[in-house]
Image (cartoon, rainbow, N blue to C red):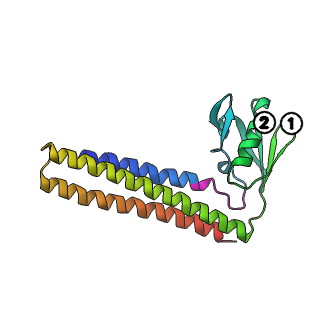
Amino acid sequence: MSSTILGVVDKKMKAVSEGLRQELATIRTGRASPSLVEHIKVDYAGVATPLNQLAGITVPEARLLVIQPWDPGSLHGIEQAILKSDLGLNPLNDGRLIRLNIPLLSEERRQELTKIVHKRLEERRVAVRNLRRDALDELKKAEKAKAISQDESRHAQDQLQKITDNHIAVAEKIAQEKEKELLSV
């Protein structure tokens, strides 16, 4: 019973860490990459749709992204979504496609981006702790229902804390790598 609970929470915590890795990949480092914008949600026909499902995203030059929507009617929505995002990019709309020039990062912008990395890391830490809290509640319910013994519950709680600490450490390592990448000129 307790091993099932621990296995489920471990998978969920891995998903949180992997989600952080994918989210941090969208933070730019001065080079053009489709992952910078593909996650942006665009209001398309009243539905928040990821940009990569509405348009082709190409990198013709090292510091240029070209977004070509499959439906030209979505150009304005894509442009607005990019402006609202925290990327600090200025889209150039020519009526058929959108060009995004990736400027060199200033020291000030690098510091802003590291703050964003820290904010996202803290959100993931909270998510992992919430998963731990939910698993602890399940363990206590199982103990109260006499499905597991007190000793087994205590052992499972210790294991849960180790799993939690491990996943928080993994998330912190991911964030440190991204911060290092951002701060290197």
How far across and down, in percent of the image, does residue 23 sit? Answer: 57, 52
Dot 2 or dot 1, earlier in sequence? 2
Residue annotated with mark 1: 95
8 with respect to 60 (left or right) = left
The rendered magenta stretch, by its main secondary structure, is classed as: loop
Inspect this view and state whether residue 2 appears. Answer: no
Q: Which residue is mark 2?
A: 75
Q: Tell me where residue 74 sits by quadrant.
A: top right
Q: Residue at x 74, y 37 (%)?
A: 77
Please provide percent x and percent y for residue 52: 66, 39
Identity, as a three-letter code, of the amino acid under mark 2:
Leu
Start and end of the magenta stretch?
24-31
Q: Mark 2 falls on what kind of element?
A: helix
Residue 28 lies in magenta, yes or no? yes
Residue 177 visible in the current orientation: yes
Q: Is residue 184 above or below residue 7?
A: below
